[in-house]
Amino acid sequence: MPSTGNLGDRVCLFLMDYPHRTRLKILGHARIADARPPPELVAQFAAPEMQRSVERVFLIDVVSFDWNCPQYITPRHTVAEIEAAVAPLRRRIVELETQSKTKI
């Protein structure tokens, strides 16, 4: 089984929701469980098709959590969202270009 490297017992997770500009910070203590001996442990956390490849389960005892201020969360948008926002502007540009050509 590969090593867990420099993983200590203290963990801090940042879960980002970019569309809503919210962030959940979770502080806790991690425990690593070997997933091979009790297969029922893996069944609780992994999809059936993934269960054979799971080697470890990381369990986190949550000490605290906090919803952070959105001030410093950079808005992120999908290409589809940007295209939808820009489409009216593109139509207006075509309209103005057409008007400009007919006036010349």
Image (tube, rainbow, N blue to C red):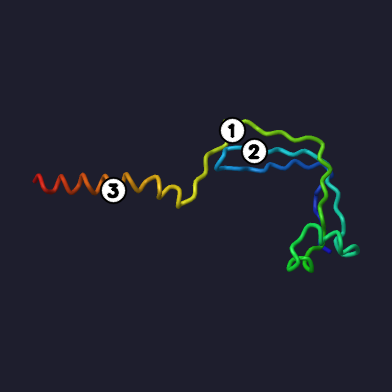
Q: Measuring 76% from the left and 66% from the top, which residue is drawn there?
A: 48
Assess whether mark 3 and mark 2 are in contact (beta carbons under 8 angstroms).
no
Q: Depth-wise, is mark 1 or mark 3 nearer the camera?
A: 3
Q: Secondary structure at mark 1?
A: helix
Q: Amino acid at mark 2?
A: Arg
Q: How much space separates mark 2 and mark 1, taking CA atoms?
A: 7 Å
At numbered mark 2, what does the secondary structure look like: helix, strand or loop? strand
Please say if the residues under marks 2 and 1 sit with CB atoms less than 8 Å apart.
Answer: yes
Q: Label 3 belongs to which residue?
A: 91
Residue at 68%, 38% in the rendered image = 24
Residue furthest to the left in view is 104
Q: Is residue 23 left or right of residue 65?
A: left
Residue 30: give x, y in percent of width and height: 83, 46
Q: Specify few, some or many for label 3: CA neighbours under 10 Å numbering under 14, 14-19, or 20 or more.
A: few
Label 3 SS = helix
Classify 37 as above or below 101: below
Q: How many marks?
A: 3
Judge left or right: residue 102 versus residue 68. Answer: left
Q: Name the residue that disc number 1 marks.
A: 70
Amino acid type of disc 3? Arg
Question: In the displayed structure, would residue 49 be above or below residue 83?
Answer: below
Image location of residue 39, percent across then percent down: 87, 64
Neighbours of disc 2 within 10 Å: few (<14), some (14-19), many (20+): some
Name the kind of residue labelled 1 in the image: Pro
Residue underneath mark 2:
23
Q: Nearer the viewer, residue 4 or 83?
A: 83
Q: Which of pointers 2 and 3 indicates the residue nearer the eye?
A: 3
